[in-house]
Image (tube, rainbow, N blue to C red):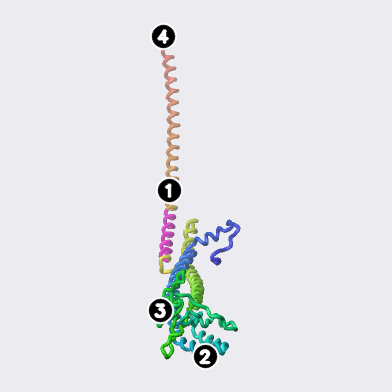
Amino acid sequence: MIFLLHPTTKNFGVGIKPMIELRSLKSKLIVATSCLLALVFIGQSIVNTISIERRLRDGINDEVKAFAGLSTRSLVEVYEEYYLSGFRKFKEIVEDTVKWSRGIARVRLVDMMGRVRFDTEDLTRKEIKDLETIDPFLLEEVRKLEPSYIHYKDSQGKIFSSDQPPSVINEIVYPFVDEWGRHQYSIVYSVSYETVQKEIQWDIVRAILFTLLLIAIAVNAVNFLTIKIIKPLLNLEEGARIVGGGNLDYKLEIKTEDEVGEVAREFNKMTEKLKESRKGLEEAKESLEIKVKERTKELQKRVDELERFHRVTVRREMKMIELKKEIESLKKKLEKKGRI
């Protein structure tokens, strides 16, 4: 997200500060919240899409069944009255009729010989087309006296049908029985779920746009909340750096009643104790220096006294040596006189 990245300064290498920003607590919270919201909303959108698709498909099925039941007789009567005599009138009526159902992609009128008497895909032509013949598997369904719902064809064209509408209908074969009980025609309605797919695509687009909008709102909300959370933490970090630099008079001005505020108060208490400890250490240092000086002075005094005593003692010893020498000298003189 671009707004999280700040320009690098000349003191940093290219890309270092954006990398630091991406590793920040704010970025982690924004990314985590966005991913969580996206996953939750995508999951909910998938569930809603499946539910909407099923509901729309069921709506198409009900609409097509009702349309087939109501339009079969009128389409056959219009065919018998206008197809050969007034093709343009027939074309207009059929087109207007088919427009009433959004799930009908194609309508074919088929006789009991399997010949397609008219096909809505051929309504754009100006001339009547030669009759086509349907495949044998579909002809079996056309000859039934009850409506059949075709929901699957295999690779060989084999039809899997039922007298009850399945969840997905490919074609509905609706018989026409006249007032004399004759079953001359059946109409094959080809069902299209294109409108369902378009609606699902729009739902997906809307879900994506809403997810992006929700993520944008969440990012701004998380950004706002993290600023309120991270700003005290940044103040705490700055305070720790200032105190670490030796300024024990610094106080954190965080007055919130949450955990950050409690940490700030404990930090201020710790700073005060450190200040008191430093003061006590300085006083102890000064006291120790005074005692050392006094002790040194006392020792120096004793050293001086010892030196004086030593000097006196040395003088006495020197005098004693001189005195001994004089005594020896007198003894020798006396001995000489005695011999004389």
Q: Nearer the viewer, mark 1 or mark 4?
A: 1
Counting from the top left corner in percent of width and height, residue 324 is at 42, 21
Q: CA distance from mark 2 to mark 3?
A: 32 Å
> Residue at the location (43% across, 69% down)?
256
User: Could you tell me the amino acid type at mark 2?
Assistant: Glu
- Residue 288 is marked as 1
Quick one: label 2 or label 4, which is nearer the N terminus? 2
Q: Earlier in the sequence, mark 3 or mark 4?
A: 3
Q: Amino acid at mark 3?
A: Pro
Q: Which mark is residue 81?
A: 2
Q: Nearer the viewer, residue 35 or 47?
A: 47
If you read the primary sequence from the N terminus, does the residue marked by circle 1 or circle 3 appear first? 3
Q: Secondary structure at mark 2?
A: helix
Find residue 339 and name its label: 4
Q: Earlier in the sequence, mark 1 or mark 2?
A: 2
User: Pointer 1 and pointer 3: residues touching (CB < 8 Å)?
Assistant: no
User: Is 169 located above or below residue 266 in the figure?
Assistant: below
Secondary structure predominantly adopted by residues drawn in magenta: helix
Quarter of the figure with the C terminus: top left
The residue indicated by pointer 3 is: 165
